[in-house]
């Protein structure tokens, strides 16, 4: 956790090598999403330093960091900036859909959903406005691909297994409750079975998100990734 925390600081220092951003929406959104990832990473480290048995929460936060990083890498994957902008718009449409669904939920309980509808319309108007400015050769995406498809496209599908394990604690599965149980039926033993090696998944997730995501952002957005992670720190 000490090394990962140091890595967070190294990224924030290397961030100063980025040029002025703002011409393209995907650049800024990728950076903003990575700030979210950095907070998740810091939370995993804080939980680890606080108590070994806080593993379940670290798994949940590790999953959030992992999924967000995967989306960042997918958004920044195309070489053509306008293809990246199209992916940003598909990402933005998710918020538009969130407001639409929330308005429906509010109205279903007899509440006023107008503010959520207004937010939906505002985002939708911005999205379609940007979409119209894309070159004719750039095809808008109908929807985001599923997460495994994102990982496959960016060459990280082998890491899908760790994401599935982390997800068990988010969804409250029987696998997750296994930290308080051994065996089944008459042979089960109650307890709290968390060991140092149990922390491999959330810490691996935190490091993968930091190193892979941070390096990609600096490389694509015009920063100096060598000032973030050099060979000595990587070793």
Image (cartoon, rainbow, N blue to C red):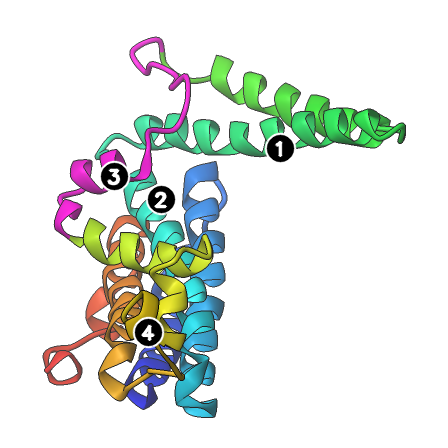
Q: Residues within 10 Å of mark 1 (few under 14, many from 20)?
A: some
Alpha carbon separation for disc pair 4 and 3:
34 Å
Residue 12, visible in the rendered structure: yes
Q: Which residue is mark 4?
A: 188
**Bounds of the magenta segment:** 136-158
Image-based side of 109 in relation to 59, left or right? right
The residue nearer to you, when weighing 202 against 37, is: 202
Quick one: label 1 or label 4, which is nearer the N terminus? 1
| On screen, residue 155 above or below 110 | below
Residue where numbered disc 1 is placed? 98
Q: Earlier in the sequence, mark 2 or mark 4?
A: 2
Evaluate whether residue 62 shows in this view: no
Between disc 1 and disc 2, whose residue precedes? 2
Measured as percent of width and height from the top left, residue 160 is found at: 21, 49
Left or right side of 91 for 157: left
Vertical position of residue 70 compared to residue 218: above or below: above
**In magenta segment, residue 65:** no
Residue that label 3 marks? 148
* Residues at circles 3 and 2 in contact by the CB criterion of under 8 Å: no
């Amino acid at each position: 956790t000490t090394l990962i925390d140091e890595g967070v600081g190294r990224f924030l220092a290397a961030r100063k090598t980025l040029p002025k951003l703002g011409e393209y929406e995907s650049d800024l959104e990728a950076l903003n999403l990575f700030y979210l990832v950095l907070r998740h990473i810091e939370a995993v480290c804080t939980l680890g330093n606080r108590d070994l048995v806080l593993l379940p929460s670290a798994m949940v936060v590790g999953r959030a960091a992992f999924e967000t990083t995967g989306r960042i890498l997918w958004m920044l994957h195309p070489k053509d900036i306008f293809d990246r902008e199209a992916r940003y718009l598909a990402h933005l449409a998710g918020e538009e859909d969130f407001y639409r669904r929330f308005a429906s939920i509010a109205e279903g309980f007899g509440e006023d959903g107008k503010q959520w509808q207004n937010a939906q319309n505002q985002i939708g108007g911005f999205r379609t406005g940007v979409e119209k400015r894309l070159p004719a050769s750039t095809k808008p995406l109908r929807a985001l691909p599923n997460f495994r498809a994102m990982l496959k496209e960016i060459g990280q599908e082998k890491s899908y297994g760790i994401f599935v394990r982390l997800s068990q604690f988010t969804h409250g599965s029987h696998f997750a409750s296994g930290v308080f149980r051994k065996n089944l039926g008459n042979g089960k033993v109650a307890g709290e079975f968390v060991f140092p090696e149990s922390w491999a998944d959330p810490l691996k997730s935190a490091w993968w998100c930091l190193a892979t995501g941070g390096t990609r952002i600096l490389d694509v957005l015009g920063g100096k990734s060598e000032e973030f992670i050099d060979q000595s720190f990587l070793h």
